[in-house]
Image (spheres, grey):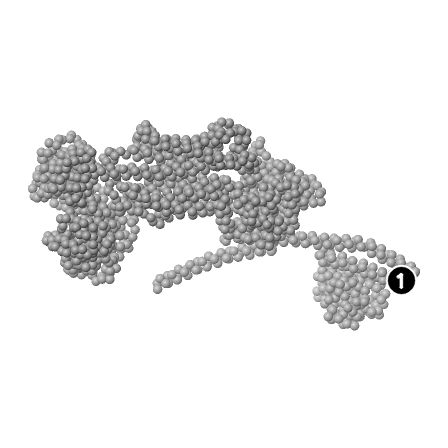
Amino acid sequence: MTILETKDLKKTYGKGETMVHALDGVSISVEKGEFVAIVGTSGSGKSTLLHMIGGLDFPTSGRVSVDGQELGAMSGDQLTIFRRRNIGFVFQSYNLVPMLNVQENIVLPANLDGRKPQKEYLDEIVETLGLSRLLTRLPSALSGGQQQRTAIARALVSKPAVLLADEPTGNLDSRTSLDVLGLLRTSKEQFHQTIVMITHDEGLAQTADRILHLEDGRIVSWQDKGGVRHGKG
Amino acid sequence: MKEFFLVAGAFLAAGIFWYILFYRREKKLMARLQNMVDAASQNEPEHFARSEISESRLSLLENSMKRFLDDNTLSAELSGKQKETVQSLLSDIAHQTLTPISNLKLYSELLLEDPRGHQAELSILQEETEKLDFLIQSLVMLSRLENGILSMRRESTSVETLLQAVYQEYLPAAKAKNISLQYTCEPELSAGFDLKWTREALGNVVDNAIKYTDSGGQVTISAKKNTFFACIEVADTGIGIEEGELHQIFSRFYRSFSVADSPGVGIGLYLARQIIEAEKGFIHAASVPGKGSVFTIYLHL
Amino acid sequence: MVKVDNRNVLYFLARRFLKVNRGRNILAIISIFLTTLLFTTLFTGASSMFLTKLEADKKLYLTSSHATIQQLSQTEALQAENVLKTCPFVERYGADQFAGIAVEERLHCSLELHTGDSASAENRLAVPTEGSLPTEKNELAVSTQVLDALGIPHVLGSEIVLHVSHGENAPAATETFRLCGYWPGDSSDLFQWGWVSGAYASEHMPMTSHGAVAGNVAPDDITSDSTASEGHVTSDTVTNGIVTDNAIDSVFGTWTYCVWYRDVWHIREKTQELNTLTGLSGSGRTGDGFRCNPAFLIAFDFQEGSISPLSIAALTILVLLAGYLIIYNIFSISVKSDIRTYGLLKNVGITGKQLKKIVRIQAFYLCALGIPIGIPIGNLAGLILSPALNSSLTDQAPTVVFVSHPAIYLLAALFSLFTVYLSTMQACRLVQKLSPVEALRMAESGKSSHASRRSFSVSAFGMAMQNIRRTWKKGAIVTLSIALSLAVLYYVSIACRNIRFEDFAGIYLDTDFQLDKLPAEGIYADFQSITPEVRQALDACPYSQCAGYVYLSEETVPLTDSLETLFQNLIDDPSANWEEATRANWAQAKESGLLPVYYMGISRMVFDALSWPGEPCSWEEFASGDRVLIRRPMRYLAENEHYYADNDTVNIRFQNGSQKAYTMLGEVSVPYTYTYPYFYLTGMEILVPEKEYQKHVDDPSAMKAVLDAIPGQEKALGQYLKDTVLAKDSTFHVSSILELQETYDNYVNRYYLIGGLLCAVLFFIGVMNFFNTTATSILSRKKELALLEAVGMADRQIQRMLTWEGCVYLGGAFFLALLFTCSYCRSTFGLPVYTLLRRTALPCLLAAAALLFTAWAIPRRQFQKMQRVSLTDRLRM
């Protein structure tokens, strides 16, 4: 089943001669449980695309629907609540709340819905991501990889419909990058998580079920797991 | 005194007010919850949509419900895929074993024709090969049946055609065992079934009857019309079945202790029942040990 | 709809924000504390002023209840009693009966003996502080003033021998009392009360011995309840002849009722209502029924009251503004520096509303610390300031009322909360409208969202100007808040010097010393207080330059047709609402054909103070005695209306039966000091020389004496008065230039004090704002400054740049304040610019020094703080 769908998504910045098309008619659909990588060079519009999908930014035209819900039809606060419940984010710069420790960071989204995450599930995530010993540390006392793992745990804890990862390994060295990627892959299997990851690194994208290539705001080709490369589709 | 009544009245009024307020609230909430569950259960789960997105508890509940339904759909899809995989694996195996088995059969027959050989051993080998062939065919069929991917086409077909086909198929085996095989059929009797599959089912029942009837015995196939069903009776004069075993004979790989020495894999009757049930009919057995058994197949008209 | 329960998370996050913002918390708490302090002080001071004035007025009018009616006959008393008992808007009331009068030379004033309940004692401000009201027949409670005058020790049980009169013409009998209670008296009281028991009254006031109302007068516990329980009296029994109105033809045995309403609003209307209900609108001493206590009327009359709501509102707004400016700055800076975290929270799923709430909760926590500290200290400050605030211009040393009331705390707390709420509004809006992508970009690419500047000016001043242009909003707030404090400073220094003592004295005193017994309430006035002995003593004073006297006696003139038309028009004026008594006087005058007039004798000194609308006449001309002057009435007559035309005959009939025809000399304006100081409508003041006055009036005593001291001898003269006149009779009311000088000093000092305090607090707030702004401006330019340093700009240059920036802000404030104050003062006081500049020179100098120091010290300190982080670290950020 389709969990995420964009239709003819366009985003322009500026006006007149200086107008820039960050996105120029992107239509993608992601099945539930799929791991999709969107690959593109910097400036190809991949971050913009991710922001649209995550409801952080509004498209100039076109539609985004996540888990059967039209994002454009929601108000700012509704969008925030929807995001909290259904979309998990993992950013390049980790974006952990600096004054909360690892545990507090992880449970924050669930707490915001007035819930306590199920203990077993939480333990399982923490265990899987190797954070058990770091729970009481503040983000400033963590390495980049640890911070990113915390961010992944935070994204997973509310069992989001889609997990969006924006260059999750951008600030990490190559070894840690592979670790983090492996963990993403594992969580996909273990928690049947749908994952959309953007990266500029073709090599890292290989782990994905499907790879989309984005250039100048358009999807130029896609590649399924078998490695077969298709033209614009 | 006046004050007392006044206070009591005030309390009562407040109580009624709150009752009405809460009652109405609860009613509203319940109605919304009911709608939610109805929407989730009746429609396709994918079409269940959130009615609102807000900080309210209800919205949160809806969200969780949606996610639950999504997960369910996904797992249903996943298990479907798994079945398909198993199926294709099975038919692959069946397909791939076909040639080796026919080769096996061919060569054992060739060997059997050579008088110098070990005739007795070779005939056992041939027999076992036959069994293996049957087993694999049955397995393929069964797996198709059980996974519900079998293309069963029920159409009005003449029962006589069925009986004749089965009769002709098993007459040589009956003759070889010196058993008289007969069939009777009401004229122009027809029922809704898939000829190919039903022939298999009936065949298995007849085969079973021949197998457990001593030579000189009798196997009779008769068909008559009932109010809703066409009844096909297969009666034999064989060893019969103990009453305690009757409910077990249709299980997969069940074989009675009393027939442990006779050949068979214990899958024929099981397969027959699966096929008949898939055609929305049923099969029934009755027996008097030592005197014979009667298997009745009911097929929808 | 049941909401998701996530309040706890918000509180939790707010607490974490507080935890990581220690410095900001301290600043915020201090400023909330200051705001609360100012509010509490303001409210405490204002209510103290209000209540002090009210209490002083109560004393002045010798009544503390809301309304009173005096001299009621037995029947009328019963009428009043019956209504008051059940009247819904009356909270409580009291009654006392006139039981006699003590005639004692030593007292210099009359001592009225009353019997009454505790409520009436409270009304007459004569509640025994030691002992109690009398219960036994021979018991008496008086003030210490009386005890002192009689030479009796302040010991309960002491014997007091008095000559008491119980009737208009009854001879005074010597009676012995036992002291059962006393209270501290006031030397300025012209009237003294003594409390006697009900038993005493029933013995000496015969009509009460049968009367029912006597049952009322069980002292101490006269309440409406006790009356009701003993309510065996109906108006029938009274009218049946036991008590009749005829029995009273004097004040003896009459009743006084005092009433407290449930609240102080609409006293006038309630009193009117009471008059209608009781049917006593024509009764009482003044013939107009219940009368409101003027103290309350004045207190709630916002033009004449001690504090104008407008000035309180203005001060409240000033405090609010000052608090707003700083708290606003603190919060907006803190939110801006934490903006990244707020953005992250939004990405994680906290809605704008919730972020707003987080800011609010932080503010609330800070308030919870700042306000409770501010209230008691503010209250204390208000209490300390109260005496200074209440140093009044006209009355000598009023009893200051110190106020600490929960309502004030509550009000101050509410205002502080409101200020904080307003101040955090901008910060709240900022976080609420925060776009998640914007926050993300900030997180991804360093801090500042400002585009990099294309061109750098290289001079320190040029760079400073560039920065100012960029952050002009913040700068404006800093400039404004400092300008506010400087404006107050300038204003105080201009305004204080604008009131010179000579001008000040001119308003209140026409001469150096005045001596009379004329209290605010006319009924207690003594128009014959300056006896010949006193006059002798005054005339003999070696320190006085000259002395003058005003004599006053009520005489009559025939009501001529022209006078009748004139007054009738006044009375009938539909726009005026004359009191019943005024109308009654007029009716009586018409009936008798005689108009009461004030026949006043004046001495040379007073004559010289008159001012003439027409040709002045000489003293010699006037002193002949056959010609009179008439005071030109200011208020009620039109320009072309006159009582008499010049050279008309004014025929005065004296009380002793004689009469004399005078020639009208002319009309003249009389300074207020020499006039009849109470209200009248139908009548006039006729002035004659004092010799002429003494010829026709039997009583040789004058109403008022005025003295001018020989320059430099004012103190000696004051001492002389104390030693001679006041020593014998302390009830004289003396207004002196000495007191006025003191009052003036107090007045000016009060201005300086309040102005100085206000200025200090505002200045502190302004400097804190400046500190904040510099801190953020350096913080947000850390990288830029590091770059400058890296490319070789010297520390000194950077510091100079920062100092320049500060100088522009503070200099702007300096001139803004000067400009504003000067233009304001010029239009208000009409002073030339030169004077204004001269007066502000000193404060300007001081302010400039302080500002320069601030502009130098604060950026320097901030810079040093920044320098502690190494250059490479700063560059990396």
Does B12 sit left or right of A99 as displayed? left
Does C796 sit left or right of C415 as displayed? right
Q: Is residue C647 above or below residue B8?
A: above
Disc 1, SS: helix
Total marks in image: 1
Q: What residue would you read off at disc 1?
A: B119
Q: Position of residue A188 (x, y in %)?
A: 64, 49
Residue at mark 1: chain: B
Instruction: Please give the name of the residue rendered at 56% of the width and 44% of the height, measured from the top-left corner.
Output: A140
Instruction: Please give the name of the residue rendered at 62% of the width and 41% of the height, measured from the top-left corner.
Output: A172
Q: Position of residue C372 (x, y in %)?
A: 40, 47
Does B276 sit left or right of C84 as displayed? right
In this orientation, does residue B113 appear?
Answer: yes
Q: Is residue C736 above or below residue B240?
A: above
Does C261 sit left or right of C455 as displayed? left
The answer to which of A169 and C302 lies nearer the viewer is A169
**Counting other residues with Cα less than 10 Å from the Cα at mark 1, is it few (<14), some (14-19), or many (20 or more)?**
some
In this orientation, does residue B224 appear?
Answer: no
The answer to which of C433 and C799 lies nearer the viewer is C799
Instruction: Check the picture and name the quadrant holding the C terminus of chain C.
Output: top right
Q: Is residue C328 above or below residue B51?
A: above
Q: Position of residue C550 (x, y in %)?
A: 14, 39
Q: Residue furthest right?
A: B116
Q: Position of residue A118 (x, y in %)?
A: 58, 54
The answer to which of C243 and C802 lies nearer the viewer is C802
Tell me the kind of residue under disc 1: Gln
